[in-house]
Image (cartoon, rainbow, N blue to C red):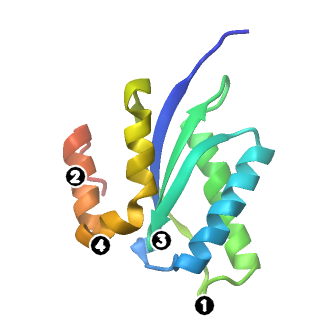
Amino acid sequence: MGYIKIWIHLVWTTKNREPLLSKEIRYLLFEHIRENANNKDIFIDFINGHLEHIHCLISLKPGQSIDNILMLLKGESSYWINKNKLTKTKFAWQDEYFAVSVSESVVDRVRDYIKNQEEHHRKVSFQEEYDEFIKMYGFDKFV
C-alpha cells in the first residue's frame, strides 16, 4: 500500500450564491457534513463558511477524486437540508467549485483562513474573495 497526503482546499457556494446559510444552519450543516464525510471515509481537516459558501480542507486518500468527494458532500448535504426543511425554499448547491492543492508548509495558514471566515467577510465580500481566488490561482472566470 502506498502512502499519500494530498491537501485540497475546497470552496463551494449555494445556488445563485443565495445567503441561506445562517449561523444556526451553518453549525448544524458543518456537523452533518463532518459525520457524512466520516461515514464515507472522507477526511475533513477543517470546515467553515459564511452565508453563501463553504470552505473545506480535506486530505485525499488513495482512490478518491475531488469530483467524487464533492458529489458525495454536496449531494447528501442538500438532500439533508431539504429533508429537515432548514431553509424556506428548496435548497441546492451551485455546480461550480474551487479546488486547489495546499502545500504541507501552509496547511496551518489555510486552517486559520478557513477558521476566520466570519471575521474575514466583515471586510471582504464573497465576490471579492472569489475574484481574488481567480486571480491568485490563474483560473479563467467560470461561465
* Earlier residue among tags 2 and 1: 1
Residue drawn at x 27%, y 49% as measured from the top left: 133
According to the picture, the residue beneath numbered tag 1 turns out to be 88
According to the picture, the residue beneath numbered tag 3 turns out to be 15
Q: Amino acid at mark 4?
A: Arg
What distance separates the C-alpha of mark 4 from that of mark 3? 22 Å
Q: Are marks 4 and 3 in contact (CB under 8 Å)?
A: no
Q: Is residue 43 left or right of residue 36?
A: left
Residue 104 visible in the displayed image: yes
The residue lying toward the viewer, choosing from 25 and 98, is: 25
Q: Is residue 36 left or right of residue 138?
A: right
The residue lying toward the viewer, choosing from 6 and 82, is: 6
Q: Is residue 139 left or right of residue 4?
A: left
Residue 33 vertical placement versus 17 (above, below): above
What distance separates the C-alpha of mark 3 from that of mark 1? 14 Å
Q: In which image quadrant can residue 111 be found?
A: top left
Nearer to us: label 4 or label 2: 4
- The single residue placed furthest to the top in the displayed view is 1
According to the picture, the residue beneath numbered tag 4 turns out to be 122
Nearer to us: label 2 or label 3: 2
Nearer to us: label 4 or label 3: 4
